Structures are given as C-alpha cells and as structure tokens.
Image (cartoon, rainbow, N blue to C red):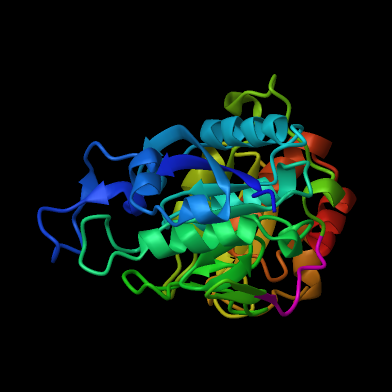
Amino acid sequence: MTKPHIVIIGTGGTIVSSGASGAQMTGYSIQGLDVRSIISAVPALAEIANIDALPLLNIGSSNIKLSDWLKLTCTINKLAEDPKIHGFVITHGTDTMEETAFFLNLTLKTEKPVVLTGSMRPATAISADGPLNLLNAVRLASSKQAWNKGVLVSLNGQIHGARDVSKTNTVSVETFCSLTSGPLGYIIGEDIDFLTQSVKPHTLSSKFHISESFKAEDFPRVEIILSHADEDGHQLERCLASKPDGIILELTGNSTVPAVVEKVVKDSEHQPAVVRASRTGSGPVTKGKAEWQEMQIIPGGTLSAQKCRILLQLALHRFGRNQKLLEKIFQTY
C-alpha cells in the first residue's frame, strides 16, 4: 500500500525548545532545534507516511503575528494544490495555537487534513510529550477520516476542532479542551475515532480568503478590553481614543455590559464595531438587554474573546462596516 505524503510545517514552540536538564519543565527556550530535529527523533513517522519537513518559522507562539498567519495560509493553500500531498501537520507553540488554528480554519481553501500539534514539555524533558503528539498528528493527517473536518488540533491523544478548542491550563499536558462542545474524537494507538464534527463554516465553506497580495498592515485593528469588578471605563476610553476599527469587550458572566462601559461606548465620538465575549471560558453569549442591541453591540456566541477578535478582523477586512452583515457573520461562524 502506498503511504500518504504528509508535509510537516514547523513554526517553533515548546516542542523544539530545550532546557538545561531533563528535569527543567519551565523557563526553557529555542536553542538550535527545529522541526527537522524532532522528526529525526521519531523514526516511527516513516512507517506511517512519506514526510517532507518545511521549517517556516522557529519562534515562541506568543510572538506570532498576523503576517505569519498570512504566510502560513498562503503556503498551505499553494501546497494543497499538489495532488500527491495528502495532508499537513503544523508544529506550533501552545500559547496561541488555538488562534492560529481558528485563523486557518476560516481562510484555508482545502478539504485535506490540517492538524496543529505541539507540546507542553520541552524536547529535552523527561517524558517529553512532543514525539508522541507529533506521531499522532501524522496518523491523523494521514487518515481519510480527517478530510473535510476543518483545521484540527491534536495533543494528548485527543482531537479538537479549531473553532472551539482552548488552552485551559498553564502546565498540564491535558491543557487543550473544547469546554462547550467537547473533543471531536480520540487517537488510541493506530486507531482514529471521530465521535462528532463541527457544523460551523470552515475552509472551503468559509467566505473568507487570503491572497498573496494581502499585507498585515492592510487589515483592520481590533482590540480586546477585559472587564472586572470596580470597572471605571478608563481603559476603554484610552482604547477608543486610539481609534481602533473594532473592540472585543471580554465581560463577566453572560457578557454583562457594566453601566460605566455602556456610558463610555455611547459617549464616544469614535464608534468602532463592538462585540461582546465572556471571560468565563465556556457557554454562549446571548443577545442580552435590548439597549445593547440598540447600541449595536454584537453578541459573540460561543467564541472566546481572542477568536471573536480574529473573526471581526477578517469580517471587517472582507465586508467593511456593515452592521447587519457583521451580526449575521457572528451568528453563522
């Protein structure tokens, strides 16, 4: 049987990081390793697929930028045109993995499997989790079951959809969870077991696209403002003074807008697109009070604040400031 052809794209992260000893689990850094180093440390990969390594970036994911996402999207879209390539694995830092995955989920134009993976322990650690995560990600990307499922995130033997997955723990290898929807499935040994799939638009069904001519500086600026007890609205006032194109309000509970925040939004001369998200980590943000609808504040549904930011940025870039269309997009995606 012919083995599938998988391209492993390296972007950096803990999976290629090193510590001073096998016992160092925090405070590590990237010190000369890249995706090719990790591939060579997992010879079992060659039994599953024919592998091509593409070291695209080699950074901690807290440093990832929109320009990197544009480059990654264009690279995969172009490679996916090759009928010999079955799928893609992206090694990535865990800090912003969910954001990169969601951006790709909205902008890639392929039904081929795209799987993000990484690790919570550096490559030099005792019981490093990176090698098995990489092996499982290649198994998943090699599977016909993973076609047309949207962008996937796979660590610790679980399969998650890009839309709903979040990093939920600072140090645990079981950090990635889809708190509202649950995992899509599991990888147990050689078995790929999908239990469900996302019904939200993604990849080929998404209305967003990326061109090689797009530049990061051409995209709207969208900021996130975190609400808290004893809110005084000053942070929001300063943000509005800088005239962003959009603001995500990451609010308490079911994204409750404090009275002082309502006043700041109403009184502001600059009126960006505004979306409500919840800081709770799970559950839907509903329409809420009628005055919030009158103020044209859009409920973010089950998306986290950071994913609301990506969706609003792409929507403003693609469609401009059309309030009804923006509301429809957040209901749909």
Q: Nearer the viewer, residue 251 or 13?
A: 13
Q: Is residue 322 magenta?
A: no
Q: Position of residue 326 (x, y in %)?
A: 82, 51
Q: Is residue 258 above or below residue 10?
A: below
Q: Position of residue 283 (x, y in %)?
A: 65, 80
Q: Is residue 145 above or below residue 49?
A: below
Residue positioned 21% across, 40% down in the render: 31
Q: Is residue 210 above or below residue 138?
A: above
Q: Position of residue 122 (x, y in %)?
A: 27, 57
Residue 34 image-quadrant placement: top left
The reply, left or right, for residue 119 in relation to residue 105 is: left
Residue 66 image-quadrant placement: top right
Q: Is residue 194 magenta?
A: yes
Given the current orientation, which residue lies at the most extreme left position? 20
Q: Position of residue 288 (x, y in %)?
A: 75, 76
Given the current orientation, which residue lies at the most extreme front position? 1
The reply, left or right, for residue 94 in relation to residue 200 is: left
Residue 81 image-quadrant placement: top right
| Magenta segment | 193-200
